[in-house]
Image (cartoon, rainbow, N blue to C red):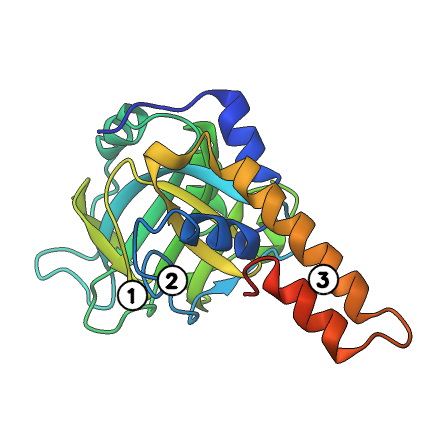
Amino acid sequence: MNPSHSAAALAALREVDACTLANAIEAFHVRLRNEGFAAGALQCRYPNLPPMVGHAVTLKIRGASPPTGSATYVERTEWWDYVLSVPAPRVVVVEDVSSVPGRGAFLGAVHVNLLRALGCVGGLTNGAVRDLGAMEGLGFQLFSGGLSVSHSYVHIVETGTPVRIDGLEVRSGDLLHGDRHGVQTVPHDLVARLPEAAARIRTHEDALIALARKPGVTVAALRAAVATGRLL
């Protein structure tokens, strides 16, 4: 488990949009440019919320099929202890390993309110979520592969193990950042350096955009501006 970061460091990351943050991470050459983020199939359910930042709490669920010995699965709470073992703020990451992922939703009004009480600020799943209207004012961000009207037979089958959501591998305690553009992991050892790197990138890009919008700008001027820094 990685150590938690200061409130100030996490607040600084929340001021950076996901695209600029991805550019900043690229600048340190710690991973390939096609790694470390969800592939694009997840939908951001509350796109007007500010960026979500938190440590990953990983779960695996099933829910497409009923149990063989009773009418439903028993609701258990011992997994809450695992949630609380991960540094706050927390993001619950739910891999639906059902035969039909998304047939039932784990993340709905009840579980989201419980998770919020446990220090979670958002969640993502390859499966479904529901009760969007009932959760709209909570400030709890959600990313999902789909929506469902029902929780079906959803039950937790693993906690704390690595999960894969839309091509993104997430381990317990990973630091996650997400906004309307998507979700990515943030290398722990770069947390303190990324806001400054993001600010430099924004400054360069803003200057280039302003030049491109200037009436009568020449191709030569644009080429000279691009040559002064990396164009992404």
- Judge whether residue 105 can be spotted in this image: no
Residue at the outermost right position? 215
The answer to whether mark 1 and mark 3 are in CB contact below 8 A is no
- Taking 189 as reference, is 224 above or below it? below
Q: Quadrant of the C terminus?
A: bottom right
The amino acid type found where label 3 is placed reads Leu
Q: How far apart are marks 3 and 2 (CA)?
A: 28 Å
- Taking 166 as reference, is 15 above or below it? above
Marked residue nearer the N-terminal end (1 or 3): 1
Marked residue nearer the N-terminal end (3 or 2): 2
Q: Mark 3 points at which residue?
A: 208
Report whether 141 appears left or right of 48.
left
Q: Looking at the image, is mark 1 or mark 3 nearer the viewer?
A: 3
Res 38 label: 2
Residue name at image x 51 percent, y 22 percent: 7
Q: Looking at the image, is mark 3 or mark 2 nearer the viewer?
A: 3
Residue name at image x 21 percent, y 30 percent: 78
Q: Quadrant of residue 8?
A: top right
Res 167 label: 1
Residue name at image x 62 percent, y 55 percent: 133
- Judge whether residue 5 can be spotted in this image: yes
The answer to whether mark 2 and mark 1 are in CB contact below 8 A is yes
Report whether 136 appears left or right of 71.
right
Q: Mark 2: which secondary structure?
A: loop
